[in-house]
Image (cartoon, rainbow, N blue to C red):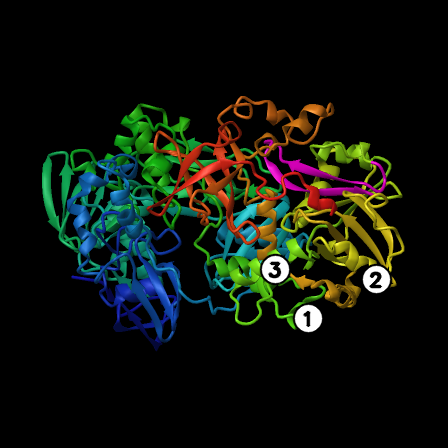
Amino acid sequence: MTGYRLSHGGGRIDRGQSIDFSFNGKRYAGLAGDTLASALLANGVQLVGRSFKLHRPRGIMGAGCEETNALVQLEHGLSSIPNVQATMIALEEGLVARSINAWPSLTWDIAGVNDRLRGLFSAGFYYKTFMWPDWHWFEWLIRRAAGLGKVPVVPDPQRYEARHVECDLLVIGGGRRGLAAAAQAARDGKSVLLVDLDQGLPSLEGVRTFEKTAALGIWDHGFVLAASEGRVLHRIRAEQIILATGKQERGIAFANNDLPGIMLAGAIGRYVADYAVAPGRSGIFFVNNDLGWRSAIEAAQCGVGVRAIVDARPQVLPELADRARAHGIDLFFSSLVRSAHGRGRVTGVTIEKPDGLSRLACDFVGVSGGWNPASQLWTMAGGQTKFNERSQSFQPDGLVANVEWAGPEPIEAEPIWTVHGGDEKTMFVDFQTDVTVADIKLAARENYRSVEHLKRYTVLGMGVDQGKLSSVPGAMILAETIGAEPGTLSASKVRPPFVPTAFGLIGADLRGERFRPRRYLPAHEWHVREGAVFEDFGWERPAAYPVGGEDIQAAAEREAAAVRSGVGLFDGSPLGKILVAGPEAAAFLDRVYVGTPSTLKPGRIRYGLVLNENGTILDDGVYARLQDGSFLLSPSSAFADRMVRLLEDLLQCEWPMDVVVQDVTEQYAVWTVAGPNARNVLEALQPSFDLSSERFPHLSVREGQLDGSEVRIQRVSFSGELSYEIQVPAGQAVQMGDALMAAGKPYGLVPYGIEALEILRIEKGYIHVGTDTDSETQPGDIGFGGAIAKKQSDFLGRRALTRRSSLSPYRKQLVGLTSLCGGILPVGGHVRAPSGQSGGFVTSSQFSPVLGRGVALGLVEQGQRRLGEIVEIVSLGRSWQARISETVAYDREGGRLDT
C-alpha cells in the first residue's frame, strides 16, 4: 500500500480549498497548507527521485530542511529552479515540479545500472578506478553524469527583495525556548526580532516576527543573513543573538535502509499531525529513544496502522509501553531491524530478536536513531561542540561573543549507529550521495581518519542537506572503525547557507547593473560618433573602429599599422589615477612597490611592480612624482579599484603612516596620442610647455595648458612609439578629443581601440598582468630581478622571494615565441616538454601587420636559458613549431620611443 489522506486532523491544511499541481507530467490535487512532499504522500506517490551516484530509488524521508531524497526541479515557463527540497515547497495552484537525476524517466532510469556495478563506484572511485588505460577516456562520461538538477538556460525571472534590519536581540527559532527568550527581552525594553522556518507563531507584544524565514548564516559583529520564503533577503545586524534552533532526528544504518517508504519517525509524526497524511497502512517503527515511541503512538492515535515498535533498548518507560499496547502495537525489546525488503518500495523487514530472526510485512518504516541539536548556526558563529554520552550527539559548548545557545536538553538515546550482520554496501549513511557503511570503512582502511578528510573522500555530508542526517552517524561509524573515542572526533564543518538558497536571492537587489554598474568612458558618445565597436573590459571600451565592412581583426591591424607609420588616438580614461600625498608618502610607497619611489625626482616617472605577500605580481604600472612632492599612481585599469583598497588596507591595518590616498580615476579623462607624428599633433594645439625631447624626455610629466585647457601630460608608452598621455577633466573629454582629431587630420591620425593596442604591446613585449602572468609569476620571471637586488629596504612580498620555490631554476619565465610558419600561435597552447608534459604555455598572440607574421609571448620553464630553442606548441590536437626568442619582436633598441 501507499500513503493516503486521513479523514480527520491536519492542523495546517484547509480541506475546503483544493490545489491542483503537476509532478512528472501527471496532475494531482492537494490542499491549501500542504507542502509538495505532503501532497505527494497524500496522493500515494512514494518514488520521488534517484540517488546521485548509484541512481537507486528514493522516497520522501523527512519533513523539513533535513530532507535529502525528495529533490525536485520547479518549473516556471522557460525558467526553472533545480534541487529544491519538496518538503520546503508550499503547494501553490498550478505548481509544476519534476524529479531530477533520472533518464528517460523516474521509474525507468537507465543509469540505474550503476547500482549493479556498484563495485566500480566505491569511496573515492574517481581517484583510483578509471585510471587505466587513460583517465580521459572516462572523464567526459563522469562529468556528464555529475550533478543533479538542470541549470536554467534563461535568466531567473523571479524578483527578489533585500531589506536591512537592526535589533538589540535576534532570536532564531520559534519553539518554547525561543518564544520565552523573545518575550522576556521585549519586557526588558529591547527591540526584538524573532525568525523561524515555521509558520503560525503566536503574536508577542513588542516582538517583530518573521515567519517562514530561514537564518542562512552568522558572521562577525552580529551580522546574519535570513531568507523569507526564498524571495526576501534580510541583512540583519543584532547586538545579541539567541539560538533556539531545536533538534534534528537521525537514522540508523541497516541493510536496504534507503528503500522508499522508510522515513524518519519524527517526520511521520509531523505528516500525520500537521497534514493528516499517513505514509501507509501498516508500519513498523525502529527506535532507540523515547521520542521515537511518541511518534509511533501519536500516529496510531490518529488512525495510522502501526504494527510494531522495535527498540534496541531492553526496556522503556512503562507508560509508553502501556500506551502502545493499548493501540494493538507489538513490542520488541533488545531488538534490531537487520534489513528491509522490497523492490522500488519497502514491503517488509527482518527483525533480529534475542531469540532469533523473524520477518514482518509492512509498507512503511519509521526510524529514529536519536536526536542532534540543530547547532549548525552555532558552529558558523565560531562555536565549539562537545560529545554528549547521554544523547550520543555533539552539543554546543563554550562561549561565542554575543551569541547564546538556548537549544533543547539532550535526549537520551542508545548508542547504535549500524546493525551488524547485513550487507554493509547497502547500509546507507548519506542517502543523497550514496555513502554507505562500507565506504566509510574503506576510507578508514585507506587512512582517511579525519572527519574532514572522510567528508571529501567519500562526499559524506556534501549534498543539499549538508549532512544534517549523515554527519554525526558518519563520524561515529568512523570512530568505531578506527577504535577512537567518540569525543575525539566531531561532526564535519557546516558552511552557509543553512538551507539551499537561490543565487538570485543572495544577490537580491544587487543584480545585473545594480551589482556592477556599466561604466562608460567620459567620451562615450564621441566614440559612438567615430564608429567604435564596444566590448566590456570592466568599462565599455572601443575594441576597434571598423570602416568599410571590416571585421574587428582587420580593423585592429589597420589601426596598429597606422600608429606605427603615422599617429593614432586612444582613450585610456580607465587607467588608474591615484594621488598619494603626505609627509610619509614616499616611505609608504617604498614599502608598496618593488622599486624605490622615494628616489624619484619631481617631474619624473618610473615603472613599478606591486606584489602580494606571496611575492606574486599583482599589478604593474607607472608612478609619477609631481612638483609638489605628491605621487600620482597609474595602476592598470583592471586593478585600479583594487589598488585603492590595497593602499587603504595597508594604511589602516598594517602601517599607520601620515599619508592620504585619493582616487581620482573618474575625475579625469585620458587621451593617448601615439606614433611618430604624436609631437606634431600636440604642437598644433599650442602647448604652454616645450615638447622637445630635451625639455620633455621619456618618462616625464608636465602640467600646463593645451588648446586652452588645463592638462597634465605624461610621456609614457604602451605601444613602443613616441607617446603622450593627456589628462583633462572628465567634462572636457569630448572637447579635447575633437581638438586632437582636428589637429591630427593633416598627419592621418586615426582612433585605435583595445585590439590594436594588444598588437602593439605584444610586438614590444610589454606584459599585461593577468594575461602574461599567473598566480605564480614573480618579478624575476619577467626580467625584473635586478630592481630587487638593488633595493635595500623591505617591501610587500619581499620575504616570499627568498623561498626555495622562488629561487628554483625551473620557474616559468616570460619569453617571446615565434612560429616557424609565420602564423598565429594559439593562446593557451602548451609548450610540450621532452617528458610529454606541459613545460609552459602561450599567454598572448596576435598577427603583426608591421612584421607580417605572428608574434606571441609565453611563460616557459627556464625560458631565458633556452633562447633560440625550437619547441612544439600543442592545442586541441594540433601542433606548431616555434622558436623561443626575446620578448621584444619590434624595435629592440627602443629608438622609436624618441622619434
Residue 92, by quadrant, is bottom left
Label 3 Cα crowd, 10 Å radius (few <14 / some 14-19 / many 20+)? many
Q: Give the range drawn in magenta.
A: 601-625
Q: Report the amino acid beneath label 1.
A: Glu
Question: Residue 333: x, y in percent?
Answer: 20, 39
Q: Is residue 294 left or right of residue 116?
A: right
Q: Residue 559 shows which numbered tag?
A: 3
Q: Where is residue 748 in the image (x, y as percent from the top left)?
A: 69, 64
Residue 660 against residue 864 in the figure, above or below:
below
Q: Give the amino acid type for the residue marked by disc 3 in the picture.
A: Glu
Task: Please tell me the numbered disc located at residue 685.
Answer: 2
Q: Is residue 287 visible?
A: no
The spot of residue 657 in percent (x, y) is 80, 35
Disc number lying in front (1 or 2): 2
Please give the label number shown on residue 427.
none
Residue 525 shows which numbered tag? 1
